[in-house]
Amino acid sequence: MYKKVLIANRGEIAVRIIRACKELGIKTVAVFSDADKNSLHVNLADEAYNIGKPLPSESYLIGDRILDVAKKAKCDAVHPGYGFLSENAEFAENCIKKKIDFIGPSAESIRLMGDKITSREIAKAAKVPLVPGTDGEVKDSEALDIAKKIGFPLMIKATAGGGGKGMRLVHKESEFENSLQMAKSEARSAFNNDAVFIERFVQEPRHIEIQVLGDKKGNVVHLFERECSIQRRHQKVVEEAPSPGVSEKTRKKMGEIAVNLAKKVSYYGAGTVEFIMDQKENFYFLEMNTRVQVEHPITEMITGIDIVKEMIKVSYGSPLSFKQSDISIKGHAIECRICAEDPDNNFLPTPGTVVYVKSPQGPGVRDDSSLFNGYEVTTFYDPMLSKLIVWSEDRENAIRRMSRALSEYIVLGVKTNLGFLVRLMDDKDFNSGKLDTGFIEKHKKLLKIPSANQDVASIASIIMVHAGTGIKNLERDPRFTPWKYIARRASVSRNSMF
Amino acid sequence: MKYSLKIGKKIISFILIEEEDFYKIELDEKEYKAELIKIDSNLYSLIIDGLTYTLALSKEGKKIELFFKGDLFAFEIPSQRDKGALENLSGIDKISAPMPGRVVKLLKKIGEEVLDGDGVIVVEAMKMESELKTNIDGKITEINVKEGDTVDLGAPLLTIESQDKKEE
């Protein structure tokens, strides 16, 4: 097995990978920008090195600098996580040139599947169903004619895109030109490439994706689907596995198609084949992500397979230790992405300092987080703070467990989407499982803070204003017996303190 | 005692009476019996009419930030000037930067007429572009930035004044 691995990432995913390495007995090397000096991943790794300024383009995206660190620290592999260099074929190649393993697929697979247009061609050849659209980049001059042919509503997407950036939904012809320019401008600043393509927009679509895992001996298996339909800004917020909208028949078909596609490009490592599916279970290929996904934990929960450890093992050259027939779905898992953003203000990010944080605990709860008291949310990086994951025997119980876990989560200092998630878990339509990617748009009420909650908050604040530092303090107030103190503290904190 | 608190653009008024073991609070013509107890650094237990709530809060100067049921509430003890300014707010929409970022595009010119809901400026932060919209019908009367400018949180971007306002 590898002796030392460099983690070319930050935040919760860096922490996740460090944990997997530690469990495999591998030493870890973290890299960090000036903004991340005090981060959890820096703390947890065996070694940590500064690689530059806060802007990703001046630190986490500089592959050569990261490889220099890997070389100097005598690492035998690099795990790129997601985002940053994870789908950069050139970086994967440079790793190999320096005799350092890239924990992920081959540079060739990344190149083929990473480009949305090439991947579409490969998918077409592999008989994967496709959404009608342009086969390549569209020029500004011909864009409107093509758009009219495909029909509205349609999507404009950056060919180099991902994570919802450089993507625009256009409802009608009159909005087209404006949206085209916005998508291009966003693509230019995010990917330094403003090429876009156009495709038909499937109505009320669900986002369903299949997790695949392959080894270097040519074995590929799938780990079933994830439903990621609860989205804002075309980015996922809540994911679950299995999907409440996928029948056993569709599941089998989708899984086989995904495995075939992966085999077509001699895929190894973890990958995800994304589909959109209409309410009648017609599904179309969206793209393949050639890296570990943010939402991989829910698949781990229902299959019992540690995806990050498997990635490391197959990268080292070990064969998969299981066959397709060994894997089955057990129970139901849900993930909520806790983000520093304001649901009631277009989900705009809310930078600031986390003053106080308390994570939920108890049965079936997993919190993949990089939060701590004093954590700084900057505008340099993604606003995701943590991923709360629960498992239970079925969907209904998993939702109830998520609701319970969310009610224990406290983040003071920056606005988060926690309140929205709390309300979502109670929503009748969410509970019924009839989901589509427009769910949040159709349930705007969930974005608003109930006025009763504001009354409670107001009452607490007014007492604070009145009493100031003279507020009753359980630790000091003689009117409270130690018994009362312990009981109150335990009931509130729900942390086992004994 | 009479108190007021500012939350967003709204001012709410309370009456608080200190009793032996609790506070009697009047808000919106309703009366509550409340007790607030500090548990741990930022953690508090609140009891209102027998119902218990857990919340986290921090107080700094005139500002109180409070976390309850997943949401963050920012209260401020209002000054006299605040109260005056708030009452005059109708008819003017001062758009400011919702977060630190960069001005990508100005969608309107000085003097141009806009309708409630129109996008007026595109700003970018965290690699995401967002169009900021006005919430009144009116005319652009002031533009404080140009395309490409880097702006801090709360920096004034542009001002829209309603026609009615001008006639007054």
Image (cartoon, coloured by chain):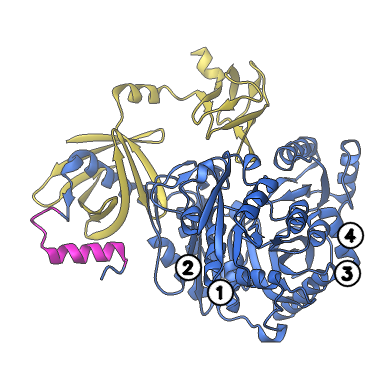
At 71% across and 37% down in the image, what residue appears? Answer: A189
Q: Residues within 10 Å of mark 3 (few under 14, many from 20)?
A: few
Left or right of A135 in this view: A257: left
For the residue pair A21 and B47, the one nearer the viewer reads as A21
Residue A106's x, y, as percent?
78, 63
Residue A127's disc is 3
Are both tags, 2 and 1, on one chain?
A: yes
Q: What is the drawing colour of chain A?
A: blue
Q: Which residues are magenta?
A: A476-495
For the residue pair A356 and A141, the one nearer the viewer reads as A356
Q: Is residue B61 magenta?
A: no
Residue A98's x, y, as percent?
73, 56
Looking at the rendered structure, the kind of residue marked 4 is Glu
Residue extending farthest to the bottom is: A325
**What's the distance in space between the residues labelled 1 and 3, CA to CA?**
31 Å
Looking at the rendered structure, the kind of residue marked 1 is Met
From the image, state whether disc 1 or disc 3 is nearer to you.
1
Q: N-terminal of the two: label 2 or label 1?
A: 1
Residue A121's disc is 4
Q: What is the drawing colour of chain B?
A: yellow
Q: Which residue is mark 2?
A: A366
At 19% across and 65% down in the image, what residue appears? Answer: A486
**What's the distance in space between the residues labelled 3 and 4, CA to CA?**
10 Å
